[in-house]
Image (tube, helix red, strand yellow):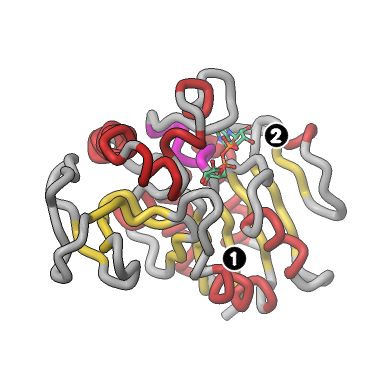
Amino acid sequence: MKKVVVVTGAGISAESGLKTFRDSGGLWEGYNVYDVATPEAWKRDPDLVQHFYNERRKSVLEAEPNAAHYALVKLEEKFQVTIITQNIDDLHERAGSSRIIHLHGLITKSQSDRNPNLTYDILGSELKIGELCELGSQLRPHVVWFGEAVPMIENAAKECYEADIFIVIGTSLQVYPAAGLIDLVPAKAKKILVDPRAMEISAKNIEMIPENAAAAVPELVERLLNQ
Ligand code: APR
């Protein structure tokens, strides 16, 4: 079975109603990254950090997967599909994708402040100060903050080395190491990028599809299934 590796970013969830980061009106317009998405922010003002992620978790729980998420599930009929997502929402899971790597964590889980390998499901949208892990330390969002290691990057890289088809959907490719995955893909692999701003993104020998994901990804999947 040919291997398809799909790297997704906030853009694939935009049509599910979840804000992207760097589009106008994006999340980083409303908040300073350094106030809510760094270990220093967590030490300085854990209440603000919890509030930021509680608000986002509420939006994620209210959102539904869109046609792009479901089309990637359909792709599994003919290919071994691995989704490498920068998104912390669970829309790929809820759509039914079977192989998902979360590079930046998953907002529906918490992790121990003392041992990041201790993770727990969050029931509902709120994670509160005072909720402790089994070691007795504060629970924080299971999210990779700026300046923290990206533990899943090696797994993601291994998938990219073996890709026959590499699809990038809805990411500005501005944040490393995720943005560097495209450089690990074999030269002979077919590369495709779906993003309304595709023509502004500089990348070599890649098919650009300058459209929104919910319209373009189902069409792309049909084409790949029938080729
Ligand atoms: N369909 C497809 N792509 C879209 C859509 C859509 N409907 N709407 C917007 N986009 C594209 C934008 O053109 C942009 O290129 O999605 C991309 C979103 O880029 P960012 O907001 O930078 O999001 P992302 O690339 O996922 O950010 C990467 O940065 O802040 C960190 O950890 C955070 O995981 C995030 C990482």
Q: Which picture quadrant has residue 24? A: top right
Residue 65 placed where, x, y %? 35, 43
What is the number of callouts on the image?
Answer: 2
Question: In percent of the image, x 64 and y 59: which residue is there?
Answer: 177
Residue 127 versus residue 88: which sits nearer the camera?
A: 127
Horizontal relation, residue 3 to residue 87: left or right: right
Residue at 38 percent across and 34 percent down: it is 16
Q: Name the side, left or right, on which 34 lies relative to 65.
A: right
Q: Is 12 colored magenta in this rendering?
A: yes
Residue 59 placement (x, y as % from top left): 29, 33
Q: Name the residue under label 2.
A: 210
Residue drawn at x 58%, y 41% as measured from the top left: 170
| Front residue (pair 191, 1) | 191
Q: Work out how far the residue at label 2 is from the one at label 1, CA to CA, in angstroms.
A: 19 Å
Instruction: Name the image quarter holding residue 96.
Output: bottom left
The one of 82 and 184 positioned closer to us in this rendering: 184
Q: Of the residues under marks 2 and 1, which one precedes in the sequence?
A: 1
| Quarter occupied by the C terminus | bottom right
Q: Position of residue 80 (x, y in %)?
A: 52, 74
Residue 80 within the magenta-colored segment of the rendering: no
59 is higher (above) or lower (below) than 131: above
Q: Which of 160 and 144 is in front in this view?
A: 144
Ligand 1 positioned in quadrant: top right
- Part of the protein shown in magenta: 10-16
Q: Is residue 75 above or below residue 169?
A: below
The answer to whether mark 2 is within 8 Å of ligand 1 is no
According to the image, label 1 marks what residue? 5
Q: Residue 80 carries which label?
A: none
